[in-house]
Image: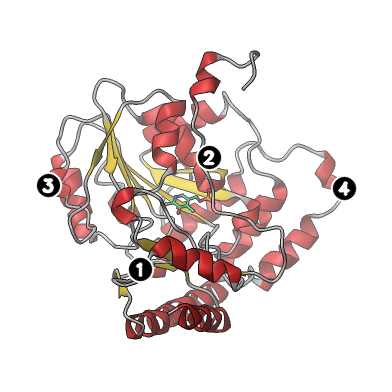
Amino acid sequence: MSRFWSPFVHKLEPYVPGEQPKIANLTKLNTNENPYGPSPKVLDALKQAINDDLRLYPDPDSSKLKQTIADYYDVETNQVFVGNGSDEVLAHIFNALFQHDFPLLFPDITYSFYPVYCQLYQINYQTIPLTEQFEIDINNYPQKNGGIIFPNPNAPTSRLLALTEIEQLLQNNTDSVVVIDEAYIDFGGETAISLIDKYPNLLVTQTLSKSRSLANLRIGFAIGHVDLIEALVRVKDSFNSYPMSSLAVNAGIEAFNDQNYFELTNKKIITSRQQLVQDLVLLGFEVLPSFANFVFVTHPQYDAEELSAGLRQQGVIVRHFKHTRISHFLRITIGTSEQNHQLMRALKMLM
Ligand SMILES: *Cc1c(COP(=O)(O)O)cnc(C)c1O
């Protein structure tokens, strides 16, 4: 608390990210990072980009990266916006595209950054409860709203909403922007990018942090109608002209070019997920159907917070949320099969 702060800063309640531990040798299953490193081609591109050009400012438009993403998803370059992590892209979306006359709508259980952006940009919001089974029911979204946002698959529940349901929502909701945050879509879902030409109020965001293993380089993007993209560019150019370094741009391009590596590592994660779900169910856990690189689990006999603490003592970290509706759940990132075995060994010690 400082008397030099603005009254607004006194009131801010910032987002709290999962722990990045300073101790080595922990099995880190708490922040949904990819357990496999980036593609070797990405690492080569990064090494190439370390040269005298680092004295220069990067391309303010990151046009080569946008072109790569546009080609990959078969859209136009001016339908693509890139930013310093999808968190930054989301921040610009909240600032540029959500209206203030009606509340923004998002699920009660969802990415906990959304209410923080609402506070930062003074946006009223209303949370819509997930069903008993932690599903999004699009019939619960009233049409008078300042915008709608949710992740698909949702986080931290890992549940997927079918593309047909998303299209139904878009047909019902034509007067405000609908944002689908597809941070985990590559782990088994179907992207809504195919719908952007039909629905000018649809914006889809994705990240290279999870399925493309580049969390450290901070690369995210949005795809939608040119008018939505132009609003984001206006905000970006009023905030930071150069959000993407040439290192991030070159690495991002190679991450899309190396399709084999992407498919191989995603396949491994999905296979490990199936195995881990089986193993957890044998221990008595209930596991929500996962389409992400994490599982959301609860045990009828054990307290989730105590399990989390017990795992940590054995060097395995997972994520526990205090929100009352999910305080009996743990979110566990899918690791390598060796990491998943460590998790299972540690759990068996506690049960
Ligand atoms: C991880 C995550 C993000 C942020 O991704 P970055 O690109 O690393 O900023 C956004 N939304 C959801 C739902 C996420 O889980």
Q: Is mark 1 within 8 Å of ligand 1?
A: no
Marks 2/4: CA distance? 28 Å
Between marks 2 and 4 in the image, the one whose residue lies nearer the viewer = 2
- Is disc 2 surrounded by few (<14), some (14 to 19) or many (20+) residues within 10 Å? some
Q: Does the residue labelled 2 lie within 8 Å of ligand 1?
A: yes
Q: Name the residue under label 2.
A: 88
Marks 1/2: CA distance? 29 Å
Mark 4 lies on a secondary structure that is helix
Mark 2 lies on a secondary structure that is helix
Q: Which of marks 3 and 1 is nearer the N terminus?
A: 3
Does the image show residue 253? yes
Between marks 1 and 2 in the image, the one whose residue lies nearer the viewer = 1
For residue 297, the mark is 1
Between marks 3 and 1 in the image, the one whose residue lies nearer the viewer = 1
Q: Mark 3 points at which residue?
A: 139
Mark 1 lies on a secondary structure that is strand
Identity, as a three-letter code, of the amino acid under mark 1? Val
